[in-house]
Amino acid sequence: MVTQLADLFPLILVAAGSALVLGVIFVRLAPQLGLMDLPYSAPHKRHEAATPMVGGPVIALALLLTYLALQPPLTAEVKAILLGASLMLIWGVVDDRIGLQPYQKAIGQLAASLVLIALGVQVRITRIPWLDITLSVLWFVGMTNAFNFVDSMDGLALGLAAVASSFFMLVMIDSGQPVLAQLSATLLGSCVGTFAHNARPARLFLGDSGAQLQGYLLAALGVAYVPAGAGLPQGVSWFTPILVLGVPIFDMSLVTFSRARRRAPIQRANRDHTYHRLLATGLDSTRSVLIMQLAAIMLGLTAFIALDTTVLVANGIFALIVLLGVAAIFLLDRWTDPILQERMSTRSAQEALPIDPPRTSAREEREPSLPEERGIHE
């Protein structure tokens, strides 16, 4: 079955429309479901009003309704991905509802990862079974948490997921994997429709369920990508998923390095992500988000360019990007960490005062509303 780009447009349209409608419904249902993110319930939660955390159910049900309506074919591989994603969604909703401890979050993420591996969706680079399984677990759990980490501003994580879904859709067409291209297109539509509710000022937050679901699905698509159908050697394509998901990977690496250097708990939520550091350089909220999403687009384009080069050139491009990323981590941490630490110290001192949370003023209304940074790092 050969799929062209135009064949995927109905999937994108139906998924986006479904997410738009479901977003309205779940925003109304969230208080009854107990899925509300309360302001000032944690130091990093500075949004001004209680906000529904229903991104996961909206994205998942949009995927389900699209598959029921258009009935694209399902392979064993896609069924495995959807089964694992269902487990990831349920675990995330439970966390949003009652709040899980870091080790409990990790158990759910590990279980969902093992579902994929048991059903044959895993890394196959080294051909050494135990090593490939280890790499698979690290990739699935790592990317699941990377999207939790990067969900630090309205619309940011959804925008990055939409960009990644778009590139996976294109590479799946190129590699002759139409069923996975259809799944990528459906995820793209779900993200676009949900984005309408999550864009600043957000009417709903992704919560653990939404951020984890996005990361898990995109990690699975990255592993399922097999470029052999396009006649491409593994030497020029093994890093394609890494570049497509490069911005969340960069953010998690930056946060982990910075907190480890400061001997701060890596699992504790804080305002020291890439987005916050861009703000510390003097950029406004909108431009900070756009820069990160533009970087994701440029990395995706670079991945496509590398596919048409030799093995030596492709790996040279990847090595250069890695070096630039490492340099950016050191520079951002060095330049912006003093500013962030000063701001956090000031806020901590203010929070110690026995006063009620401030009322919304005209100035505060212009400040970005920051969704809860959730995940295994809490």
Image: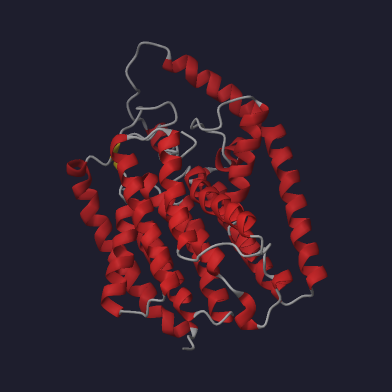
Q: State left or right for residue 11 relative to residue 326.
A: left
Residue 289 position (above or below residue 260): below
Residue at 36%, 27% (x, y): give it. 40
Q: Residue furthest bottom?
A: 1
Residue at 42%, 53% (x, y): give it. 112
Give residue 128's quadrant in the image: bottom right
The picture places residue 185, in percent across and down from the top left corner, at 44, 72
Q: Residue furthest left?
A: 32
Residue at 45%, 16% (x, y): give it. 350
Residue 251 visible from this viewpoint: yes
Q: Nearer the viewer, residue 373 or 88?
A: 88
Q: Nearer the viewer, residue 285 or 243?
A: 243
Residue at 30%, 49% (x, y): give it. 54
Q: State left or right for residue 247 relative to residue 94.
A: right
Residue 351 position (above or below residue 360): above
Residue 49 visible from this viewpoint: no
Q: Residue furthest front?
A: 129
Residue 353 position (above or below residue 273): above
Give residue 17's quadrant in the image: bottom left
The picture places residue 10, in percent across and down from the top left corner, at 36, 79
The picture places residue 214, in percent across and down from the top left corner, at 44, 56
Q: State left or right for residue 266 relative to residue 91.
A: right
Q: Nearer the viewer, residue 311 or 117?
A: 117
The picture places residue 44, in percent across and down from the top left corner, at 44, 30
Give residue 65's quadrant in the image: bottom left
Q: How many marks?
A: 0
Residue 106 position (above or below residue 315): above
Q: Nearer the viewer, residue 93 or 278?
A: 93
